[in-house]
Image: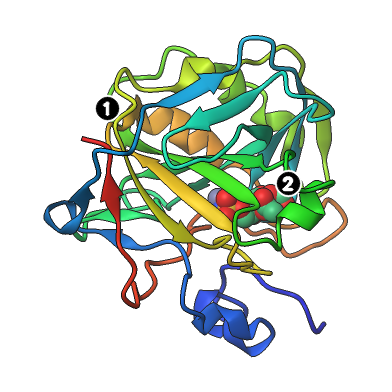
Amino acid sequence: TGNHWGYGKEDGPSLWHKNFPIAEGHRQSPIDIIPHEASHDRSLGPIILNYDRCTSINLSNNGHSVVVEFDDSDDRSVIEGGPLDNPYRLKQFHFHWGGKGCEGSEHTVAGNGYASELHLVHWNAVKYRTFGEAATAPDGLAVLGIFLDTGDEHRWLHIITDALYMVKYKGSVTNFKGFNPKCLLPSSLHYWTYLGSLTTPPLHESVIWIVLKEPIMTSEKQLGKFRMLLFNGEEEDQRAHMENNFRPPQPLKGRKVRSSD
Ligand code: SG4
Ligand code: ZN
């Protein structure tokens, strides 16, 4: 079909431009971040995550990733500060990851990838009425990216990985109440920031990216549980394990990456 896309040979990132010409636009994501080329900007304040009263709703497999959705009907969970002019509401978070022994992050640092990348997607409810409206505006979204490195088991990530068997197939959803993503943050909130896009179709150029410098740790065993998920639905007979669901770095095209420290 016309707007079908994925991460395979026939529908992967190198072909997305056919149906989504913005794929070759001027502020596409992800990018390779070159630390010594990022400019330290003294005007950049710390980022503040107000997730204290945040309310997760469910966990789902949308055929591209695994997503935890939040109640975004008021300002109870927001990100503010840093490059942002006003608070942005938490809408959902999801992950990108590789195959066994492979890279899996979307952003890379000096050419090096991590095993996985967590994205916390927030929208500008001060300027826009709905998430959909914000998703097409140049300052509509703020995505916080966090790298996952392999090593020791993560103390809290198991709450997610233990639930993944319930959303094995595309289209499956399960209740997921009371999860606060604060437990997934590294100790330092130093970051890089730049203007970019969604990393999947429709690739809208609407994202203020905030990528944390310090990764969190996860074990191969926990990553293996992500790779048990399937890209396909329960009724399809073609089984395809969900892995390598990341877009490679895109040309910087003159953009500046700023550093918080
Ligand atoms: C993943 O495919 C998520 O599952 C999508 O979330 C998300 O779309 C998409 O990535 C792009 O987001 O932070 N990587 S990204 O740029 O957030 C949106 C859902 O489809 C619009 C819920
Ligand atoms: Zn993402």
Q: Residue at x 77, y 16 (%)?
A: 177
SS of the residue under disc 2:
loop
Establish whether ligand 1 lies closer than 8 Å to the Cβ of label 2: no
Q: Amino acid at mark 2?
A: Lys
Q: Amino acid at mark 1?
A: Gly
Q: Taking the image as drawn, is residue 227 in sight?
A: no
Quarter assignment of residue 82: top left
SS of the residue under disc 1:
loop
- Percent across and percent down for residue 27 are 47, 70
Disc 2: which residue? 127
Quarter assignment of residue 20: bottom right
Mark sitting earlier along the chain (2/1) = 2
- Percent across and percent down for residue 28 are 48, 70
- Percent across and percent down for residue 151 are 27, 27
Disc 1: which residue? 151
Q: Residue at x 46, y 28 (%)?
A: 222
Q: Residue at x 58, y 60 (%)?
A: 198
Residue 132 vs residue 222: left or right? right
Colouring rule applied to residues: rainbow
Closest to the observer, 243 or 40: 40
* C-alpha separation, residue under disc 2 versus residue under disc 1: 41 Å
Furthest toward the right, the residue is 235
Closest to the observer, 17 or 197: 197
Q: How many marks do you count on the picture?
A: 2
Name the front one of labels 2 and 1: 2
Furthest toward the front, the residue is 43
Quadrant in the picture for the C terminus: top left
